[in-house]
Amino acid sequence: MAARKNLVIVGGCGHVGLPLGIVLASRGLSVALLDIDAAKVATINAGQMPFRENGAEPVLQQVLGSTLKATTDSNCLRSADIVITVVGTPVDRHLNPTVNELYNNVDGLLQHIQDGTLLVLRSTVSPGVTKLVYQRIQSLKRDIDVAFCPERIAEGNAMEELVNLPQIVSAFEPAAMQRARDLFLTIAPTVIELSPLEAELAKLFTNSWRYLNFAISNQFYMLAEMYGLDFYRIHDAVTRDYPRMRSFARAGFAAGPCLLKDTLQLSAFSGNNFFLGHAAMLVNEGLPNFVVSQLRSLDLATKTVAILGMAFKGESDDKRDSLSYKVMKLLELEAREVLCTDPYVPDARLVPLEEALGRAEIIILGAPHSVYRDLPIPPEKVVIDIWNYWPERHRESAQPAVALAAGEVHS
Ligand SMILES: NC(=O)c1ccc[n+]([C@@H]2O[C@H](COP(=O)([O-])OP(=O)(O)OC[C@H]3O[C@@H](n4cnc5c(N)ncnc54)[C@H](O)[C@@H]3O)[C@@H](O)[C@H]2O)c1
């Protein structure tokens, strides 16, 4: 029988690393989740997920202790056949990718990993980073295969998507490509081979494309609502039985740790000539300002406002870069009081749903969690529902139709 492969995922307790590690462990690989966050390591080793991810916890409990463990000890790298790194790649305060952080992190790993290892970059990286890592390894005369295989899951659906979606794999050398292909074929039905630069762009195109599409819908939403029209009546009219508009997204906060960041990465790569990306950022990041502008005619200084859902999207407990927090920040300057609530997000500032609903005169739906679907909201309350999550309420409620100057929208 072939020896079980040892695999280490660096950043393995995060949203990308953990589901991937669980799925790989469930396919018989021996997986160590290496992370600097000792609290998450302890939670996982106790059989619990540190965040919401559909269907992950039962599989975690099956593989834990047999083919999966979490650790803070980087010594596990020494016996690894395969190392996958998924540490984050944020943008800095100049809105540029922090290439150095990932590069230095990989450089640190090289001190521990042995020759003969396959090193897979799985984070979303700035174009050219895979080549930098490859060249660094060559300059050190190390015999380490390098591949870039971008993660494409949507948080919450990782367990399903990892095993059903095609996996993009890329490498400079045929041997590395073969190893990356073999690795991902243990979990996915198909792999698609690209060159590393193509794969880096493929990932950024995917997220930027989604971000641009949300911006189109959000811009149209603001246009319609500025003139007191119900965007969703128009959305329904143009999408119903009309195939060419099938991809017309609904409006909503386009936020979270990836879409804006990756649009900015593409923008930096383009030498700040990615006009569509910048325009999308103005629109999507301007939507909270628009929501607040819509409410100004209601004498906000005398009103309590509740924001329902602080996660960056429905059913999630992830508040990273959530636009609900931007709405909160804006309203704190203008409203009498802002009450925020969320059933999943851990945040000491949040209040129970009943309190938010009971005390607020204005209710803003920040994230469409399914627990909000059938909420009994008294008819006298003003409701702002950019998602059209409560279509009945949307039609009935007298939205404040405020004619705004165009410049106010993205102030
Ligand atoms: N979240 C998503 O849905 C998603 C989807 C596709 C791609 N990505 C990309 O994947 C990358 C990771 O995103 P994420 O959402 O998993 O982030 P995350 O913050 O959830 O996870 C990153 C993990 O890395 C750990 N970490 C940080 N520095 C470390 C180090 N030096 N050594 C070991 N562990 C370290 C952190 O403690 C954390 O647990 C990003 O580049 C992101 O853009 C994310």
Image: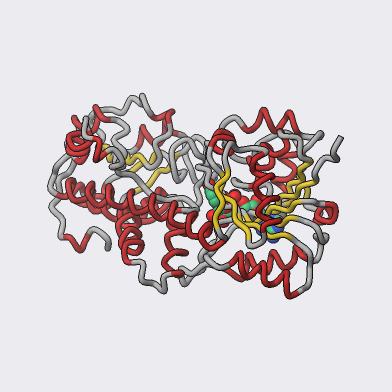
Residue 301 visible in this rendered orientation of the protein: no
Is 231 on the left or on the right of 311, as rendered?
left
Is 300 on the left or on the right of 126, as rendered?
left
1 and 102: which is toward the camera: 1
Residue 38 visible in this rendered orientation of the protein: yes
Quadrant location, the C terminus:
bottom left
208 and 186: which is toward the camera: 186
Residue 113: percent from left, percent from top: 80, 60
The total of numbered circles placed on residues is: 0
Residue 273: percent from left, percent from top: 36, 71
Quadrant location, the N terminus:
top right
Q: Residue at x 36, y 51 (%)?
A: 327
Q: How is the image coloured?
A: secondary structure
* 264 shown above or below 364: below
Residue lying at the far front of the rendered structure: 174
* 311 shown above or below 266: above
Q: Residue at x 48, y 59 (%)?
A: 201
Q: Residue at x 41, y 70 (%)?
A: 270
Q: Residue at x 63, y 67 (%)?
A: 101
115 and 396: which is toward the camera: 115
Residue 356: percent from left, percent from top: 39, 36
Is 183 on the left or on the right of 320, as rendered?
right
Tell me which corner region of the image, top left, top right, bottom left or bottom right, holds residue 69: top right
Residue 330: percent from left, percent from top: 35, 56
Is 226 on the left or on the right of 203, as rendered?
left
* 45 shown above or below 9: above
